[in-house]
């Protein structure tokens, strides 16, 4: 039995997230959903959070916090079952007096040895969404080798899954996770997408006007680099298709796209997500900078900040 830790907050957007995932997973008899709610204490809230839904549970007695928390869990469980997910596969967990919900979510997943964590976005302004204190952003950053689903409702009404392959070492992990979690879901279609990065510095201008012979040599080197790069990506995509097929996916529902960079890798990915209204986007989290603050770049962080209407699956 596989488990998904679904962090819930009782807000309208949070309940819609539960419904979306319930409809997606309703036929998965091999998945158990652990609903987890943190009742946050007022000392831990940021100033912009004071007016949010959790204010009613701040500084309340333990039994009152527990009662309010159980109500959130009950409402979330009802949404799951209304979506068709079996009641027998739902477990409830509650944390009161939480000082940092993001870290508590990760700790709970560690305690229960759950690899997949699902969180929602609260629908703040774009500036607010970039704050380091955002629960979804912190979970995505600090979840280590876990997979984090960040759900932005309303989710695009399509059956399209994008597997964004940034580099060949991570490709097999993305394919295996997609096959493991989504192949059993009926009706989905899959697109492997790779954005070829810009030419590396070795192919840049040498600082002088090239002779005709030098220009031809440069073109040959560039063409070889692109051919070698594309060949490696195609092999990874072929392997990914085989992995999906081994899990029952009809290869007629799988396509591959290799595109050259236009506006930058992250922006090009966002444009493809918007153009094709992908419902699920699976990508690696390796582009998060090691010990640096979350906001200092990385393709995954930009997709997390700016993608709309998707279930973004960040694979550790």
Image (cartoon, rainbow, N blue to C red):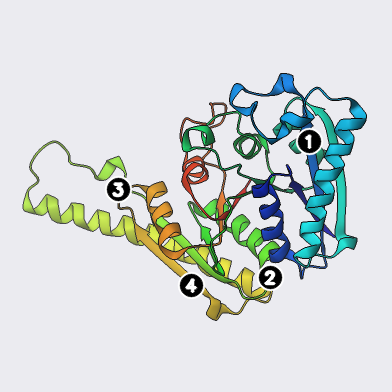
The residue wearing badge 1 is: 38
Q: Secondary structure at mark 3?
A: loop
Residue 148 is at least partly visible in this image: no
Kindly indicate whether the residue at mark 3 contacts the one at mark 1 (C-beta within 8 angstroms): no
* Classed neighbour count for the residue bearing mark 2: other residues with Cα under 10 Å, few (<14), some (14–19), many (≥20): some
> In the picture, residue 111 is in which quadrant?
top right
Residue 210: where, in percent of width, then height?
9, 46
- The secondary structure type at the circle numbered 2 is loop
Instruction: Please give left or right for residue 160 compared with residue 178 in the image.
Output: left
How far, Cα to Cα, is label 1 from label 4? 41 Å
- Check disc 1: other Cα within 10 Å, few if <14, some if 14-19, many if 20+: many
Q: Nearer the viewer, residue 54 or 216?
A: 54
Which circle's residue, 1 or 3, is located before the other in the chain? 1
| Residue at x 70% of width, y 51% of height | 15
Dot placed on the residue nearer the N-terminal end, 2 or 4: 2
The residue beneath circle 4 is: 255
The first of marks 3 and 4 along the sequence is 3
Residue 127 spot, x, y in % from top left: 47, 33
* 1 or 2: tag closer to the N-terminus: 1
Residue 3 at x, y percent in the picture:
80, 54
Query: Seen in the image, is 223 located left or right of residue 58?
Result: left
């Amino acid at each position: 039995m596989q488990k998904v830790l679904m962090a819930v907050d009782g807000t309208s957007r949070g309940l819609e997230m539960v419904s979306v995932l319930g409809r997606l997973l309703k036929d998965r008899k091999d998945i158990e959903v652990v609903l987890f709610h943190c009742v946050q204490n007022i000392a831990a809230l940021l100033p912009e959070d004071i007016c949010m839904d959790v204010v009613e549970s701040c500084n309340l007695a333990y039994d009152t916090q527990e009662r309010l928390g159980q109500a959130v869990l009950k409402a979330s469980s009802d949404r799951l079952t209304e979506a068709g997910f079996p009641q027998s596969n739902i477990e409830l967990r509650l944390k009161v007096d939480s000082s940092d919900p993001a870290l508590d979510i990760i700790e709970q997943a560690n305690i229960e040895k759950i690899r997949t964590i699902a969180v929602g976005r609260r629908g703040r302004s774009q500036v607010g969404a970039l704050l380091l204190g955002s629960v979804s952003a912190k979970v995505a950053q600090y979840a280590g080798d876990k997979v984090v689903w960040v759900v932005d409702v309303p989710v695009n009404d399509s059956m399209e899954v994008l597997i964004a392959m940034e580099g060949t070492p991570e490709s097999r992990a993305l394919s295996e996770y997609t096959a493991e979690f989504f192949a059993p879901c009926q009706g989905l279609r899959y697109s492997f997408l790779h954005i070829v990065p810009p030419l590396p510095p070795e192919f840049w201008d040498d600082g002088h006007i090239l002779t005709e012979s030098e220009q031809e040599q440069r073109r040959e080197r560039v063409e070889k680099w692109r051919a070698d790069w594309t060949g490696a990506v195609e092999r990874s995509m072929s392997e990914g298709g085989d992995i999906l097929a081994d899990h029952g996916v009809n290869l007629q529902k799988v396509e591959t796209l290799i595109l050259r960079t236009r506006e930058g890798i992250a922006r090009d990915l966002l444009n493809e997500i918007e153009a094709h209204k992908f419902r699920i986007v699976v990508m690696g989290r390796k582009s998060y900078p090691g010990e640096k603050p979350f906001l200092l770049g990385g393709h995954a962080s930009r997709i997390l900040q700016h993608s709309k209407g998707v279930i973004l699956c960040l694979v550790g």
